[in-house]
Image (cartoon, helix red, strand yellow):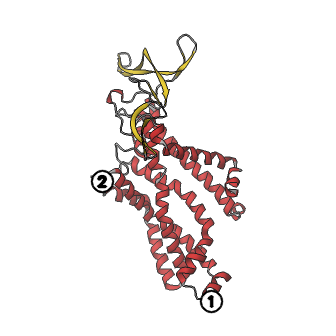
Amino acid sequence: MEFVKKILNDKFARIAFWMLLILYFIILFADFIAPYSSFYSNREIAYVPPSTVYTIDENGRFSKPYTYNYVRKYDPELMQTVFKQDRTRKYYIKLFPKAEKHKLLGLIPTHRHLFGVERGGELHLLGTDINGRDVFSRLLFGGRISMTVGFLALLIVFPIGLLYGGISGYAGGIIDTLMMRFAEAVMAIPSFYLLIILAAILPSGMTSIQRFALIVVILALIGWAGFARVVRGMVLSIKEEDFVQAEKVMGASKLRIIIKHILPQTTSYVIIAMTLSVPSYILAESGLSFLGLGIQQPDASWGNMLKEAQEFTNILYRPWLLTPGFLIFIAVLSFNLLGDVVRDILDPKSQVRK
């Protein structure tokens, strides 16, 4: 708790912490918060603009929140199709309405959602995409992939990097030399281009879940080497400490000394590295999905949702499609701000070096 208090004492870290907490809370309860499922589609309302929610009626009095449906019309002056509100009927917004069935937290079956509209109405807080899918709902479901890929990759990267770097640093000599040369060879590989190549040769018939799992593995297998190299440097100095020498005299095995006495001394660096590594994995997954080599439609991730916004006409006339890019920016910035403060707390010498 003392550690969390120190983080929250910094104004920017406090904002970043709460932003990330809100993001993870929302994606955890995405099925309940989202008014539509991730696969909901209505081609009749493709590219419909965000719904306008009214709280004042036509007589100027306060009213329950309501909205109007959009209808597609052709504008002869603009020579293009436009959406206009059908003001012949109001659709009131309701809390906890019955809608599409889902499982709360993946366990509890329910038809209840946080909010919605009366039957026959359409509520799209951030508009719809080319297939008439609700952008707001897909942002929540897409965040589950984009915001978890980093932590899943770390579950592979850090055990490998810790053990590899620990063994290399403790063993020394020819073993250390060979292990470090191999790690440097892995580090020399241009990671993003390798990701593109590996993602491109994946079988086309793979499901998004399988593709997501392979992306996590690929990201992990090219990210451990740099971490292992730093751990190895720390182990080189730690292994000369008196408590390590005492363990040797007592007859402890090398593996026991590495795992129980040396690697725990690197905990501060590991926490800092984990916090600062997550943004790079978020960007890598988003980049792959943006290029069409990651998560495939109809499954959502912030990367493949942002792909639709690359057309100039969409940027100009449908700016709501840029929302995934804004969320990627917020998530990456928040992790970086939080990581900087964690580094300052756990490694006070870094403040002196700045």
217 shown above or below 34: below
Circle 1 residues within 10 Å: few <14, some 14–19, many ≥20 = few
Instruction: Report, in whole angstroms, how far the alpha carbon at label 2 lies from the one at label 1.
Output: 54 Å
Q: Position of residue 63 (x, y in %)?
A: 55, 17
Q: Residue 178's mark?
A: none
Relative depth, front residue between 16 and 178: 16
Q: Is residue 226 left or right of residue 313?
A: right
Residue found 51% across the figure and 66% down from its top:
158
Q: Residue 249's mark?
A: 1
Residue found 32% across the figure and 30% down from its top:
43
Which numbered mark, 2 or 1, is in the foreground of this view? 1
Callout 2 amino acid: Met
The kind of secondary structure element at disc 1 is: helix
- Residue 171 seen by the camera: no
Q: Of the residues under marks 2 and 1, which one precedes in the sequence?
A: 2
How many dots with numbers? 2
In this figure, which residue is indicated by the disc labeled 2? Answer: 206
351 shown above or below 292: below
Q: Is residue 166 left or right of residue 305?
A: right
Q: Position of residue 235 (x, y in %)?
A: 59, 76
Relative depth, front residue between 116 and 130: 116
Residue found 49% across the figure and 46% down from its top:
28
232 shown above or below 295: below
Q: Quadrant of residue 256?
A: bottom right
Circle 2 residues within 10 Å: few <14, some 14–19, many ≥20 = few
